[in-house]
Every structure is written in C-alpha cells, then in structure tokens.
Image (cartoon, rainbow, N blue to C red):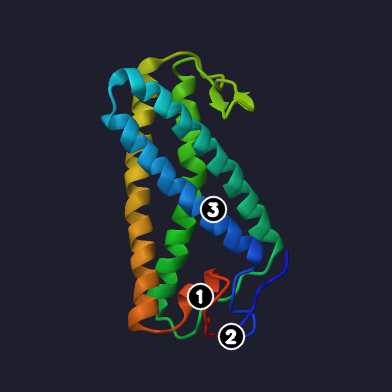
Amino acid sequence: MSTINTGAAGSRYSTGAMIFHWVIAIAVIANWRIAEAAEHAPKADAGAIMLNHKALGITILILTLGRLAWRLTHKVPPISNNHANWEKILARTVHIIFYVLLIGLPIGGWLGVSYFGKGVDVWGIFTLPALPVGEDPAAGKAIFGFHGTGGEIFIYLIALHILGALKHTFFDKDGTLWRMLPFGSPKG
C-alpha cells in the first residue's frame, strides 16, 4: 500500500498503518462492549455472547500481529520536535502498553479457557485448541480476573490516548491527529 502524505514530508502514517489502527481500535471498543453485554446478560445468554468476545479477541490478536509486521517493514513518521519530552515519553509508553495488551489479553483469555479444558472457536472458521495446561478451574478464574483488570486498564489508556489526540487537535493545533487519518493537515 502506498503512503498518503500531505503536509510535512514523512509526517503521515502509511495507509496500511492507518487501516490497522482504526480497524483494531473499532474491534477493541466493540469487544469491550460485548464483554459488558455478557456481564449484564442473563446467565443463559452470557455464554453465547462470550463466544463472540473470544472470537473477536483472537481476531484482534491476528490483526495486531499483522500490524506489528507492517510496522517493522514500513517507516514510522517521527514524533514532532514540537512535543515536550514528557509527551514523547508518555506517547511511546502508552503505545508499548497498547501492544502488550493487544497481544497479552487475547492470549490470556485463551489461557483462561484452556484451564477449563476448552478451546476458542473463531467465527466457525477454525478452533484454537486448549493450551496444554491441564484443567484447573481455579487457575482459569484467576487468569480471567487478570484479564478483566487488563481490559479495564486498556479502556483507561484508550481514554488517555483520545484525550491526547483532542489536546493536540484543539489546544495545541499541531496536526498530530491528522497523522493517522487520510485527510487533514499534519505538521512536521
């Protein structure tokens, strides 16, 4: 895919990076809402709802691995020198944590169901078998506790990420948001 680049040379992410970013972002928010729906659904319906949560989680994992491969093979525009050092450090830290959670949460969910002796059906296309950990429902429940906490942390970091984008757009007016969109004017 080609790089869409208006504004300062090299200041916009590639089309592939944009597609991965927005598809994964939408999938993560949808998966959070699916988990919330399952949590508030009658027990008879919660299991069926969670099948979608698990399948979408594995889909997010696959997309994230694709995004990482894309990132390793395509140049990433540098962070603007107009940002304060604390902003650069915070942005890099949040992005690293995003990747850890985008990989760790789906694997953790898979591990949790594996402790119940179950695999993960992915949209009826394929099934990931249970990991070879042996059945241990107590360990599975503990993993799901960590999984839920990780999900909550992820939502808070997404909110911080959105607030940062809004700050740069409406207060700093530095064009940072436009680096991840195919329109607007990013600034170098």
Taking 154 as reference, is 18 left or right?
A: right
List the residue tagged with mark 1: 178
Query: Does any portion of residue 150 appear in the rendered image?
Result: no
Q: Secondary structure at mark 2?
A: loop
Q: Residues within 10 Å of mark 1 (few under 14, many from 20)?
A: many
Q: Tag 3's secondary structure? A: helix
Q: Position of residue 43 (x, y in %)?
A: 30, 20
Q: Quadrant of the C terminus?
A: bottom right
Residue 2 position within the rendered picture, expressed as x and y whole percent measured from the top left? 72, 69
Q: Determine contact: label 2, label 1, CB under 8 Å.
A: yes
Residue, disc 2 = 7
**Residue 67 placed where, x, y %?**
61, 54
Residue 96 circle label: none
Q: Amino acid at mark 3?
A: Val
* Label number found at residue 23: 3
Q: Is residue 107 in view? A: yes
The residue under the point 49% across, 21% down is 114
Residue, x 45% and y 34% (percent of image)?
Answer: 53
The answer to whether the residue labelled 3 contacts the one labelled 2, judged by CB atoms less than 8 Å apart, is no
Question: Which one is earlier in the sequence, the residue at label 2 or at label 1?
Answer: 2
For this rendering, which residue is in front, 90 or 126?
A: 126
